[in-house]
Image (tube, rainbow, N blue to C red):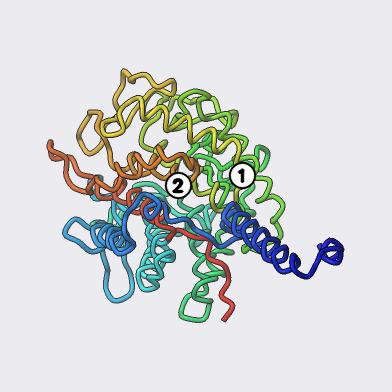
Amino acid sequence: MSIVISHLSKKNTGKLFFYALLFVCTNHVFAQKNKAAFSSNNYPNIFLKAGYKKADIEAKVAKAYYDVFEGPNKVYFEVGDSMAYVSDVKNHDARTEGLSYGMMIAVQLNKKDVFDRIWRWSKKYLQHQSGPREGYFAWSINPATMKKNSEGSASDGELYYITSLLFASNRWGNNTGIDYYAEARRILDAMWKKDGTGNIFNLINTEYKQITFVPEGGGYKWTDPSYHLPAFYEVWSLYAKDGHEQFYKDCADTSRAFLHRACDSVTGLNADYTEFSGKARTSRFAPAAFRYDSWRVPMNISMDYYWFGKDKAWQEDYAKRLQNFFRLKGIQSFDDQFNVDGTKPEYILQAGGFKKLRHSIGLVATVASTALINNNKSSLDFVHELWNNKLQPYEDGYFDPYYDGLLYLFSLMHLSGKYQIIKPSTN
C-alpha cells in the first residue's frame, strides 16, 4: 500500500488510507466472527439475534437454573455441609450422567460450591477406589438406600467428569480444597491402565478410537452416538497434558467421521445405539430408533461447530437436513421418537411409566441449538419454539425435570453464549 500512496497526490492519500483502514478493520471483524470460539473467544448469543432483550435472556437462564437446582421440582439435593447429588427423580436414582452434567453446568455458571458438593458425593459413593474398576464410577445408585444399582460404568459419565474437572482447574485453580486437575488425571491415568483385566477396558476403544457404550465386556465393542463429543476430546488434548494429546485429537476427528455415517443422509436422525461403523444396533431395551439418548446429538454437533469449527461444511449441511425434517413434522408439534428414516416407530419406548409420543422440551431444546450452525433466519423459528416452551408437567401428568430439564438448561446456555471453553486463568 505504501508504494501506491507514494504515487498519489497528498489530496488523495488521506482518503485512500481511510478506506484501506476501513477494509482491514471490516475484514478483521468478519474473520473474528467466522472463527471458532476457541480462537475468537466469541460465543454467539442467538437469543439476541432472535430479538429477545438481554435482561430477559439472563432471566430465562436464571429461571431454568432455579427450576432444576433450587425450585420445588429440583433434581439437585444437598447432603450435609459439603455434598450433594443430582437425581433422576422419576427413576429414583442418581446417575453419573446427571451428576457430571450438574458439574458441567456449575463450572460454566461459576457455581463452585455446587460443583464441589457434587464431586465430593460422586467420589465418595460412586468412584471405585480399588480393583479392576479403580478410578471409574458405578453409573447408578439409589440415594435413599445408598445401594448401587450397578457396579459398572457408563462411559459418558466419565467423559463429562473429566472435562468438567479440567475446566474447574482452569477456572478456580487447584488450591481451594480440591485439586481438580489431579482428580481429572486420576480418571484418565486409570483409564489408560485398563487392559481387559477383570473384563474392564479403556473408556475409548483404542483400536477404533471411539468411545464405548460401557468400558466392560461386550459393551467395549459398540457405541452410543450421543457419547461422541469431539469438542471434549479437543479440550483433553489441550489441558489434560497426560502424553496422549495426539490420540485425543485423532479421537475427535474419528468422532466427526463417525457422525457422518451414523446420521441419516436425508433426515439427519441417528439411532440411540450403533456399531462403530455407524450402523444402527438393536439393544435389549428396544429396536433401533431415534429416541431419548439421540436427542443429545444435535446439541453435541452444535457445540463442536462453534467451539472448534473443524467440520463446518458437513455440520452446516447436517443442521439444514435436521431442521428441514423437524419443520416438516411441525415445529410446534413434532414427536420425540422416530425411525431413523423419519417414519413413526412401531415400538414406543416408555419413560416414567408413560408409553406415548409427545412434543418433549428436551428435544425441542437440542434441535433449537442447531441455530448455532445454520445462520438462515428460518432457524430462529426453532429458537422461538424453545423460548415459548416451559419446563412443567404435561397435561397427562408426565414430568421429567431431570433429563428434559438438564437438556433444556444446557441448550439455553449454548444459545445465550454461556457454555464456553474455559481456558486457564491468566491472573
On the image, numbered disc 2 is attached to which residue? 152
Q: Where is residue 294 in the image (x, y as percent from the top left)?
A: 42, 36
Asked if residue 345 is positioned above or below residue 232 in the image, the reply reads above
> Element at badge 1?
loop
Left or right, 318 with respect to 330, comes to right
Residue beneath the point at 42% across and 42% down:
296
Residue beneath the point at 16% across and 44% down:
393
- Name the image quarter holding residue 84: bottom left
Q: Position of residue 50 (x, y in %)?
A: 36, 49
Kindly identify the amino acid type of the residue bearing the numbered disc 2: Gly
Whole-number angstrom distance, CA of label 2 to CA of label 1: 14 Å
> Element at badge 2?
loop
**Residue 420 seen in the current view:** yes
Kindly identify the amino acid type of the residue bearing the numbered disc 1: Gly
On the image, numbered disc 1 is attached to which residue? 196
Asked if residue 206 is positioned above or below residue 330 in the image, the reply reads below
Left or right, 24 with respect to 345, comes to right
**Image quarter of the C terminus:** bottom right
Q: Position of residue 395 (x, y in %)?
A: 12, 38
